[in-house]
Image (cartoon, grey):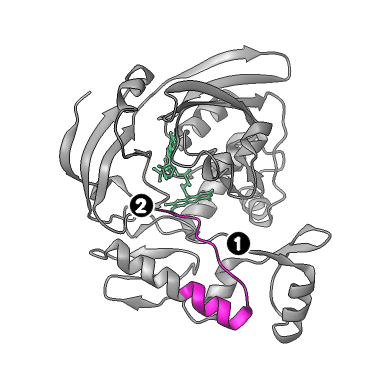
Amino acid sequence: MEIVNQVSLKDKNTFGIDVQAASYTELTDTASLPALAAYDEKRVLGGGSNILCTGPVSGLVIANKIKGIRLVQEDEQAVWLEVASGEVWHDLVLYAIERGWYGIENLALIPGTVGAAPIQNIGAYGVEVRDTIAWVQYFDWNDASFDTLSNEACRFGYRDSIFKQELKNRVFITSVCFRLPRKSTVNTSYGAIEEELRLAGVSEPGPADVAAAVIRIRSSKLPDPKVIGNAGSFFKNPVISLQQYLDLKKEHHDMPSYTVDESHVKIPAGWLIERCGWKGYRKDDYGVHAKQALVLVNYGKAEGAQIWQLSGDIVRSVQEQFGIELEREVQVW
Ligand SMILES: Cc1cc2nc3c(=O)[nH]c(=O)nc-3n(C[C@H](O)[C@H](O)[C@H](O)COP(=O)(O)OP(=O)(O)OC[C@H]3O[C@@H](n4cnc5c(N)ncnc54)[C@H](O)[C@@H]3O)c2cc1C
């Protein structure tokens, strides 16, 4: 394992921010983890699709290149796949689809690695990854030991898990085990999927049809990071009380919402940001995407600190206009 000093992370984060890592290494096996535990400051880098680097990155950046997919258990209903954390998420989706295994097809085309998927419980088109995770294995930097957490112990929530709370920056996730049903359980309830399937003339969709529909929808809606730097949704959709929603609705009749439970609703952050006039905003090389207000972008030479400042301005204006606090989804380095 080679450790190199002063490495640019520009092509290693989807925002395309040009910052230097003080030290950088690529990890291909878990056996080297105990040796790395001795480093004071370290960060795990997957696909770099959910980070914003706001300045030079001190310490050691460990790029996760650990590969491997293993069938560890199966019965008539399902298969259990143990997947090394450095596998590319979308490749895993395609791997499962080819074999007729269900459950993650709605999550097609989400950038990044398998190891990062449980951290913010990735979700899209009516499905969250927690629905298929059996357990997560990790290496704990604090006591240099390997451990396993069951699905329940991961305490998954909306774009949240124990890995963003108590275990934040404390572990290296080494593998994730997925339980994938063999029988049809496709979820097409998300409106745009049904419409896409109808347009494609598919009446009895399998996982491959759903993934193809999701890929078409995502490609038409989201900016490709290879063309315009971005990290997908920059903010989480805020959850507010039903009472606050009803009060706001008196003034903003067209405010959209999704029911969370009897007393809470979720408001699309993109709608709030657009209403504050930010959609399509651009200053120098940074701004808010013209088609999707939830996505902050780097048009070329933006600095992470500029995007961070813009995100703060957006948080403030949404707070002022709606009294709602937006929370950043992207991890700040
Ligand atoms: C165009 C675009 C669309 C997106 N769409 C969605 C979407 O629909 N739904 C969604 O949920 N997300 C979406 N995202 C966000 C992103 O793809 C996910 O959060 C993804 O899981 C990040 O994976 P990564 O490997 O790139 O993580 P990175 O960005 O490399 O890392 C993210 C954080 O996790 C930590 N980390 C990464 N791997 C490990 C590990 N093995 N062990 C411990 N810590 C680790 C890092 O230190 C960092 O703090 C989108 C991003 C983009 C650019």
Identify the residue at image location x=55%, y=45%: 165
Whole-angstrom CA distance, mark 1 to mark 2, is 22 Å
Image side of residue 85 versus residue 194, left or right: left
Callout 2 secondary element? loop
Identify the residue at image location x=55%, y=15%: 71
Whether residue 289 is visible, yes or no, is: no
Q: Which residue reaches farthest left?
A: 5
- On residue 237, the disc is 1
- Magenta residues (range): 314-333
**Residue 139 located within the stretch drawn in magenta:** no
Horizontal and vertical percent position of residue 328? 50, 60
Q: In which quarter of the image is residue 132?
A: top right
Does 321 sit above or below residue 242?
A: below
Q: Which residue reaches farthest bottom?
A: 251
Horizontal and vertical percent position of residue 81? 56, 21
Horizontal and vertical percent position of residue 136? 56, 27
Identify the residue at image location x=25%, y=63%: 300
The residue that label 2 is drawn on is 333
What is the three-letter code of the residue carrying label 1?
Answer: Asn
**Residue 322 located within the stretch drawn in magenta:** yes
Identify the residue at image location x=76%, y=84%: 250
